[in-house]
Image (cartoon, rainbow, N blue to C red):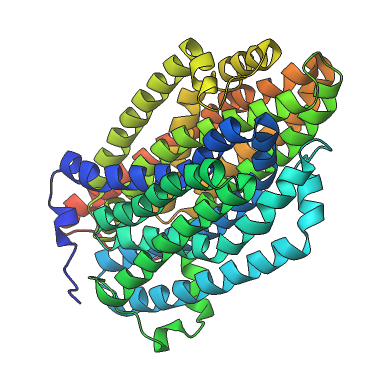
Amino acid sequence: MNQNANQYLAEEKISKLLLKFSIPCIMSLLVSSLYNIVDQIFIGRGVGYLGNGATNVVFPITIISLAIALMLGDGSAAYLSLCQGKKDTKSGNKSMGNVVMLLLASGILMAVLFVIFKSQILIAFGATPNNLSYANEYFDFIILGIPFFVIGNGLNSIIRADGSPQFAMITTLAGCIINVILDPVAIFALHMGMKGAAIATITGQIVTAVCGVFYILFKAKSFKLSLKNMIPDMDIIRRFVPLGISSFLTQISIVVIMGVMNNILVKYGAMSKYGADIPLTVVGIVMKVFQIVVSICIGIAAGSQPIVGYNYGAGQYRRVKELFTTIIKAEAIVGAISLFMFEVFPLQITSIFGSEDGLYNEFAVLSFRVFLSMIILTCIQKSTSVFLQSLGKPVMSMGLSLLRDFILSVPLAIILPMFFGVEGALLSGPVADIVTTVAVLIMAHITIKELDEKSMDSAEEGLPATTEVA
């Protein structure tokens, strides 16, 4: 174990570091998002849109699991980077032992709870009489992979913070490739339908988890895992868990929004010409595509987390400010490209998940063009939240996530359909983004001003400023 293994984070050119860390992080998060999307593509062609509707009903349990995994993994990764900047090896080692213990325990606990409350979960997330049998079949098998899914995603954050983003990308990619290969075999060759899609998915998740465990046991560079450090230490846990709250809220908000949206779409869709199942299925697809864009923008910000945390911990505030401005520019570009695709090619994107009739396509085009019309603002908001998390500012980070994804989106999704019908649910996203942008600008101004002040103080003292690890 080398205490100075990541010293280059304070010396290498910013653009070069961002490319090294963010691209693998983006790929890892994209691959994680693609698991369910790949299932939907093959299910849409092998089972039909009711099968896709069923995956939308089950999908929230995957996101809940990912939320827990990222809260623990991203939080401990941010804390590890801050510890590395301060050369605090002891605290870093303790946090790694504790997070491994928590990932294992939480993965098993969630799988058990999901089984116990299966019926309530399916009803809560909008199962209809038409897709309930498909949802039950998919749920019964996908639940077996939850512990592996939690461990694999949580460890990936730690592997990136340890300075091995390529390894994290390869482990996730390996699991996804296995899923892509097994999906058509199970669905079309073996005629296993929803069950086959679920088995293909959990097989890939197991591979990713095993690779992650191998890394932390035998290849870790900046920390050492030991049984002693796996003993619960509430002081350490209280330090790193808050740093992952923003990641948790980013994911869990998708669950809350999907739960509310699914029920609203079923209710108001039944009153419209589209019926209940078309809006439920279409918006599920839109949310999956939205998740791809979110994965890219969070990947840019989360990939830079080891660089941000290390430099902030080492008192290199000017580099931190440069990172922030570079990240925002990159996020705006991602948002602009995404907006162009959603406004110009919505039908082509929808057709990837299977071809249906005129009403289905009509609502799909409307959904992409309205619900994702402010995607540029979404990208900037998400990245700012993750950046604040990397600085060890969980309250500010959590505040942004809460504002957009809970305080605004959920009430809007309930209220707007009362006036505009099923189409009103689609307006909740862009309206929430516009309001949240005001808060983003305020917090960005405060953060840049603070970094400038710290930089000036350090220059006057002639020494790098020190920062207490939160």
Residue 2 position in % (x across, y down): 17, 74
Question: Total of numbered circles in the picture?
Answer: 0
Residue at 32%, 62% (x, y): give it. Answer: 159
| Visible residue check, residue 242 | no
- For the question of whether residue 67 can be seen, the reply is yes
Up/down of 449 relative to 198, above or below? above
| Residue under the point 41% across and 42% down | 30
Give left or right: position of 405 versus 164. right
What residue do we see at 53% from left, 36% from top?
A: 42
Where does the image place residue 154, in percent across and percent down from the top left? 45, 61
Say which of 145 and 236 sits in front: 145
Q: Nearer the viewer, residue 170 or 235?
A: 170
Is the N terminus in the top left, top right, bottom left or bottom right quadrant?
Answer: bottom left
Q: Residue at x 52, y 50 (%)?
A: 246
Q: Nearer the viewer, residue 150 or 375?
A: 150
**214 and 238: which one is in front?**
214
Q: Is residue 442 left or right of residue 356?
A: left
Counting from the top left corner in percent of width and height, residue 208 is at 40, 60
Is 469 left, or right, of 187 in this rendering?
Answer: left
**Position of residue 232 measured from the top left corner of the image (x, y, whole percent):** 51, 82
